[in-house]
Image (spheres, rainbow, N blue to C red):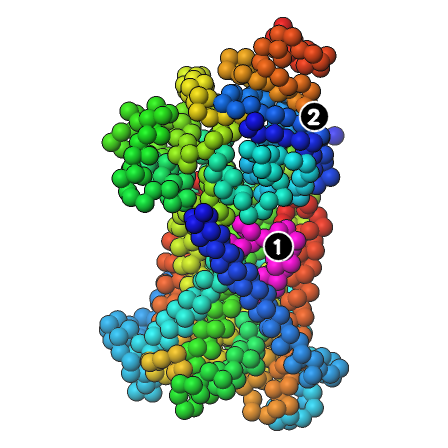
Amino acid sequence: MPNRYEMIQRRILKDRVAQGTMCGLTVFAIVFLAAMAVGLYIKSVPVLENHSLFSLLGSSEWKPMKGEFGFLPFIAGTLWVTGLAIIMALPVSLLTGIYLTEYARPAVRKMVFPALDILAALPSVIYGVWGMLVIVPWISERVAPHFIEFSSGYTVLAAGIVLGVMVVPLLVSLFIEIFTNVPVELREASLALGATRWQTTRKVVLRKTIAGMLAATVLAVSRAMGETIAVLMVCGCVVGIPSHLLDACYPIPALIANNYGEMLSMPLYESALMFAALILFAVVLIFNLLSRIVLYRLERRSI
Amino acid sequence: MAIEIRDLNVHIKDAHILKHVNLTIPEKQITCIIGPSGCGKSTLLRTMNRLIDSTEGVRLEGKVLVDGADIIGSGAGITELRRRIGLVSQRPCPLPMSIFDNVAYGCRINKMYKRRKGLIYAVQKNLKAVGLWDEVRGRVRTPASRLSIGQQQRLCLARSLAVEPQYILADEATSALDPVSSKTVEDLFVALKRDYTIVMVTHTLHQALRIADNVVFMYLGEIVEAGPAAQVFHNPQQELTRNYLSGVFS
Amino acid sequence: MNVIRSKRIEELFFKVLMLAATMLVFALVISVVWTVLSRGSRAMSWDMITKLPGGGFYIGKEGGFLNAIVGSLYIVGASACIGLLISVPVVFYLNVYLKKTSRLAYAARLAFDVLFGVPSIVYGAFGFAIMVFLGLRTSLLGGIIVITLLIIPIFIRSMDEATRNFPHDILDASFALGATRWETLKVVVRQIAPGIATATLLSVGRAIGDAASVMFTAGYTDSIPTSLSQPAATLPLAVFFQLSSPVPEVQDRAYAAALVLTLIVLILSIGGRFITSRFSKNKL
């Protein structure tokens, strides 16, 4: 029979070892984030040595063969598409979120939540297929003829719509989470004073959650910026700064994805694409950090 | 007669919460509802201003007459009804805005004053009515959440009064307060009964004993006994009431 | 009274707007799913999912995309297993070992949330950079590594959510009996098993649909990989590449592949929801 004391020692040792391993794994996540930044930076050093940051970001000359890398068209493309997507998705998501938390009966919620789940679960490439089959023809046949002579349909507008649909489930679920954190008593206090439900929502619920809604929007923006395949399939991929909604565009993720095969042949080209990834990473990192910290604060305060 | 409840039944999902409640609440007096927790006191209170509607799976039957008009089944008039019936809840619940805006909130929503002057006057008047004016004077623009709990509760009362209700419902309005603030709020209610009809759910018998004009004793969703305070406390007709009272008094 | 009327009109106006927005969302879901299902089922045939691409496949001849199905399953299966092995201990560590106010827990949760937000294309680019550094070519192994990295934050976030509401009384009860924290895990596992199952299904659903990261790292091929160093095809890329072909028959295959991918994801998503609703009653 083993010594009782020894047994306890062994159990405690086991606990310690497990703790060490787990702690290591957890710390690894934080380190990994830093490693990603460093790795992408190291990879983009060659292009940064040859060009000034200003010319990289501010020039619109994109001639990889000649070694000219101006990212402006791609940055502009990203901003156009993301901006459009958020402008369209935000009101719809906000209204849906309010409806589901403040108005809808449980039966309605039971119908809409699974639908949102599906919308969130569908892969990017499926949205791309949908965009090509539904949105692109719609734009080229129905929308564009009113404004310009010809459009293939592969436009900023198409990319914006597809992307907008993709961020709706994220926004709605964030909004619902934020709104449900508002205590019921606040709503009742307002209702008891003779406010209607909408007045209560606007003056109490929305007012109380303004920071959270802002954070959620920033989160959605960063998600939209990095979306690749769906946008790539409908954006047209023409290098140039888009001047209106029916222009083709070429956002940064599409650029990276489209050229991964060729980039090895030219060292600077590879470096330039890695730099593009670094820009994306940096923006997303900052946006995410800011909005998550705000959301954490709100969550903790409500408890 | 002010509020008259006739054969009110409230079901929430499968539970029969209020059973055949008949009650008359007289004007310009304090009516206290007492009883063990879970007996339906709060439900009864929340039925009177129909806040009960936001509970899931609720079903109302019977009549609740406020000034002779039945409020059950009338969908659209609810918001106006709620304006006429103020509510002070268990925990003070300042809205996320300044002290001034809290009191002005209801006035603005109901567009009660065309000019700003009128609004400012109304806010002042109601803050004075709850004895808060001297304490917050000069900082009415600061967030209401910075007030102490007792001050917050009085602010909520001022906020209710600002929409010029005829009735005030109070749901254990002093239970979250310290003894001193509790006394202040209690005295306030006594002072207010000159102008308002007050219905209180109270968790302490002592409070009911101190301020009630009428007492309603509820047990398991039914009204066991109701009547003038002196009669219910000193000469209860029902065995159940006697037991409940003696359990606490002895 | 005028005020009452204007209040009521405002209320009605916004209610209609909200209903419209909700219906729009609903209509979008139906539109996306219906488009893919109807277009895909027209192109679907038994050959598609049982055969490899034959000779002349890309000009419209015989064959299917079994290579992509198998490739996707290989990559996601392996990544999910490795991912679980790494994430489950991390979730336990965050919830059982660390205190609620721990700074490490805060930082780690923040890091995982941020990692969750990092676009898959950046994962792909980073993975590719590492592979070049190590001298690896696009391969099954590369795909597995990147998808594992991608799936871990998703796993951890969703499992953490399921574990956070775990009643601490149970932990205390176990500690009080003299169990170490490690031994207490057994109790926790049993409690949150449905949560883990749901999280797994949802994360796998996300991982299987991710195209941008495997594009760089797993590559694409017409055959089923037989070793870790060979490139592997994946379903999303099968959709993407074949759709860019001008040949209608090849495009048809893309639609069929899209159908298969959608069905897999739908099944995973519905399965996840089913487990959640079956085993936890108080959750929406």
A99 within the magenta span: yes
- Residue C85: x %, y % from top left: 61, 54
What range of the chain is rendered magenta?
Answer: A97-119
Check the image and report above or below for B199 versus A185. Answer: above
Q: Main secondary structure of the magenta part?
A: helix
- Residue C262: x %, y % from top left: 64, 71
Where is mark 2, residue-wise?
B222
For residue A148, say whether it is visible.
yes
Q: Chain of mark 1?
A: A
Q: Type of residue at label 2?
A: Glu
Q: Residue at x 47, y 51 (%)?
A: C5
Left or right of residue C275: residue C152:
left
A143 within the magenta span: no
Residue A109 circle label: 1
Check the image and report above or below for C160 versus C226. Answer: above
Q: Residue at x 42, y 63 (%)?
A: A222
Q: Type of residue at label 1?
A: Arg
- Residue C31: x %, y % from top left: 60, 73
Left or right of residue A95: residue A244:
left
For residue A209, say whether it is visible.
no
What's the distance in space between the residues labelled 2 and 1, CA to CA? 34 Å
- Residue C230: x %, y % from top left: 59, 77
Single out the mark in the foreground, 2 or 1.
Answer: 2
